[in-house]
Image: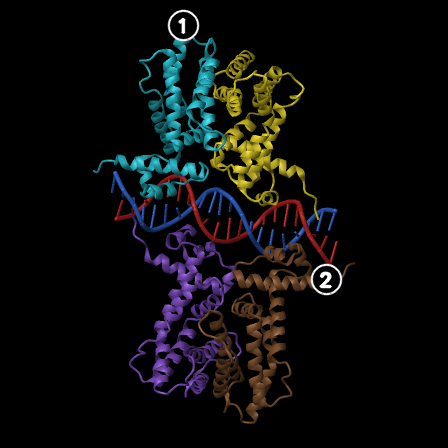
Chain colours: A yellow, B cyan, C purple, D brown, E blue, F red
Amino acid sequence: MRLKDENKSENIFYAAVELINEYGLAEISMSKIAKKANVSSSTIYVYFENKEDMLNKLYLSVKKKMSQAVFDNFDDLSLQTAFENCLRKLADFILNNKNDFLFIEQFSNSPLIHKLSRKEGTELFDPIRNLFEKGKKQNVFKQVDTHLLVNFTFEPVMKFAKDHFNGLVEMNQENLNKIIQMSWDAVKA
Amino acid sequence: MRLKDENKSENIFYAAVELINEYGLAEISMSKIAKKANVSSSTIYVYFENKEDMLNKLYLSVKKKMSQAVFDNFDDLSLQTAFENCLRKLADFILNNKNDFLFIEQFSNSPLIHKLSRKEGTELFDPIRNLFEKGKKQNVFKQVDTHLLVNFTFEPVMKFAKDHFNGLVEMNQENLNKIIQMSWDAVKA
Amino acid sequence: MRLKDENKSENIFYAAVELINEYGLAEISMSKIAKKANVSSSTIYVYFENKEDMLNKLYLSVKKKMSQAVFDNFDDLSLQTAFENCLRKLADFILNNKNDFLFIEQFSNSPLIHKLSRKEGTELFDPIRNLFEKGKKQNVFKQVDTHLLVNFTFEPVMKFAKDHFNGLVEMNQENLNKIIQMSWDAVKA
Amino acid sequence: MRLKDENKSENIFYAAVELINEYGLAEISMSKIAKKANVSSSTIYVYFENKEDMLNKLYLSVKKKMSQAVFDNFDDLSLQTAFENCLRKLADFILNNKNDFLFIEQFSNSPLIHKLSRKEGTELFDPIRNLFEKGKKQNVFKQVDTHLLVNFTFEPVMKFAKDHFNGLVEMNQENLNKIIQMSWDAVKA
DNA sequence: AATGAATGAGACTTCATTCAT
DNA sequence: AATGAATGAAGTCTCATTCAT
C-alpha cells in the first residue's frame, strides 16, 4: 500500500484558500481546487468526506494557525502587555496572511460552517477569555459579559484590516497604536 | 405593455434573502429563488441582468433599508444622543430583521460584492461619519481616522448580535446599555 | 413559452430501450440516452424527475403498449378463443418488439421498479385475470388461485421467446401451437 | 506466499448477492461490495479479473448451488417422483435462498451474462432434460421440444415465487401441490 | 411582462481499476 | 496475499441563461 502523502492534503488546503479569496465561497469548485493543488479531484475524496467536510476542516486548520500566532508567548505576560501583544500579533497575522484571514471571515459568516466547527474554532481563543476573566476579578476590566470584552478587542481591528485591504485606510503603526488605546478604553474598568 | 410588477421584484428579493440564510450564498440558485418567489426563473431576468446584478441590487436594497432604520430622526439630536440612538436602532433593526442582517454580513464578506456596491453601501452610512467629523472638531471624539471611530461603534454590537443568534449570549437591554457605554469610552476624547 | 415537443419524450423512451438492450440496465447512462435521442442530457430532466422516474415511466409505457397488443379485440370472444388469441398476440408482440419485451423482463426483475409501477403494470393485465375468474365460475378452469392460471399461461411462452432469442429453439407456428395446447392442459379443469 | 483465503472469496460473493438484491445490479459497485465483505476493494482483484468476471463467476456459483439442491437424490427415482421431487426442492431452495434466486433472475435477464456462462448455467440443469428425453421415449411426456417441457416445469413456479415475495400470493403446500399438478398436466402425454 | 422549454457547461461525487508497498 | 492511496473517466443532476411564444 502506498503511503499517504501529507503534502497533498496541505496543497489542497492552500489551493482552496487561494481560490476562495479570488472567486468567493460561492464560486469555487472541487475541480478548480484539485487543478490548482495538482491532484486529481477524486483524490480530494481520499482525504475528505465531501466539500463541506473539507471546508470545515480547512476552517479549523486556518483558525488554529491564527490562534497560535496570536497567543504566542501569551501566558507569561502582565495583563495589559498580554492584551496589547495579542492585538499586535493579530494585526501582524492578518497583514501577513490576508487570504487566511479573509477566508475565515467569509466562511464563518456562511451557513456552511458546522455548529461543532464554530464551537471548536471559538475555543481556540479561550486564552483571551481567560485573560478577561482574571482581569475582571482584579477589577482591571469592566464587569460585563466576557464575550463583550472580546468583541471590543478583536472586531474593530479586524474590520479595520478589511477596510485596509479595501483601500479605505492604511493599517500602519500609528493607527494600530490608536486601535489598541481605544480597545483598552472600551474594556478597562 | 404591462408594467413591471413591483411586487414580483420584492418577492424575488425576499425569497433570495430567505434562501441565502438557510443554505448560504454558495448553495442558492436562480431556480430555487424563482420557485420560492412563485415566479418563473426567466422572470428574474426581466428585472435583473443576471445573478450577480440581482445580488448586488439586493444588497443595496437591504443596506438602504437598514440605514434608514438606523438614521431615523438622526439629525435633530445632540451628538451623544444621536450616537446612542443610532446604536439602539441598529440593535433593534438587527433583532427584528435577522435574515436581512445576516445576508449583509455574508454578502459583504464575499468577493461577489462589486466595488461600486460596496462604495454605495458605505455611503449610506455617511451620517455617522458626519457626526464623528463634527464631534472631532468639537474635541468630543478622539482625533483618529473616522473609519476607526465608526468601527468601534458598529462592529462590537454587530458581533454581539451574531453571538446572540448563535446562542452564546443574550442581547438584552442591560447588555445593550453596556455596549453603548463601552463604545462611547472607546471613541470619546 | 415554447411548446413541449412530444417527440422528445418519445425519442428518449426509444433510445433508452435500445441502449438497455444493448448494454444492460446496469450500464446505461443518461448521457448515452441523451446522445442517442438527440437531445441534451439536461432536457431529459425537463420530462422526468430523475433516472428512476424515467425508467419507471418507460416501463409503464412499454407495458401498456404490450397489453394493448395482447388484449386487442379480446372481450368479444369465447373463453377458449380469447385464451388462444391472446397467447398468439403475445408471441407476435414479443417477436416484433424484441427490445420492448426484453426491457420489461430486465426491469421487472430489478429493484429499480417501484412498488406502484409494478402494481400498475400488473393491472394492465386484468383482462386475462377476469377471463380466468369467469371461466372458474363456469368450471372451465381449475379451481386455483388466478395468479397461478396466469403464470401457466404467460411464463412458458415468454421463457420460450427468450430461448428463441438465445438461439436455443425456434419460435415457429408449430411450437406455438404446442405451447398453447400445453398451457390449456395446465389450466383447464 | 500466502494461500488465497477461500473465505474471502465467499465473503465477496455473499456481499455481492446481498447488495444486488438491495440496490439492483445497476447500482452496486466494487467498493460497496468490498466494504460489505470487509476487504479492500483491491483485494477483489486478487480473486477476479474484473467486475464482469466476478459477476459471471458468482452467477455460476449460485446456479450450481441451486442445481445441486434441486437434483439432490434425483437419479434413483421413478420419472414422476423425480419430476415432483425436483419441483418441491426448487420451491424449497427459492424460499430458503431468496437472495440467491432473485440474483439469478436479475443477472440472467441482463446482457452482462456471458454467452458461455449462460451455456454452463443451462447445462447444470441437464438432469431434468435427460429425464424428459427418457420420458418422451416412453411416451410419458408430450412429443415436443424438450426446452418446452422444461419451461412448463420451472417457469410457473419461479414466477409464483416472485409473486409470493411481492406479497401477491402465498406459496404454501397447497398451492405448491396445485402447481405440480398443473405442470404435470402440461407436460404429460 | 411573463414563462415553460431547452441546453451546454459544469457541479459534486463515485466508479473500476492500478500502483506501490 | 493483501491493501490503502491514487486517479482518469464517467456518473447523475443542477446551473445560469436564452429561446420562443
User: In the rendered view, does D46 fall on the left or right side of C184?
Assistant: right
| Residue B78 figure quarter | top left
The answer to whether residue B111 shows anywhere in this view is no
Q: Quadrant of the C terminus of chain C?
A: bottom left
How busy is the neighbourhood of tag 1: few (under 14 within 10 Å), some, or many (20 plus)? few
Q: What is the secondary structure assignment of the residue under circle 1?
A: loop
Q: Name the disc covering residue D5, or none.
A: 2
Pinpoint residue B159: horizontal percent, then vertical percent: 47, 26
Residue type at numbered disc 2: Asp
Of residues D92 and E15, the one drawn nearer to the viewer in this rendering: D92
Chain of the residue on which disc 2 is drawn: D
Q: What is the secondary structure assignment of the residue under circle 2?
A: loop
Pinpoint residue A76: horizontal percent, then vertical percent: 67, 19
User: In the rendered view, does D2 fall on the left or right side of A188?
Assistant: right
From this view, report whether residue D16 is shown above or below residue C78: above
Q: Are marks 2 and 1 in contact (CB under 8 Å)?
A: no
Residue shown at 60% from the left, 24% from the top: A130
How busy is the neighbourhood of tag 2: few (under 14 within 10 Å), some, or many (20 plus)? few
Q: Label 1 belongs to which residue? A: B138
From this view, report whether residue A134 is shown above or below residue C185: above
The answer to whether residue C104 shows anywhere in this view is yes
Residue type at numbered disc 1: Gln
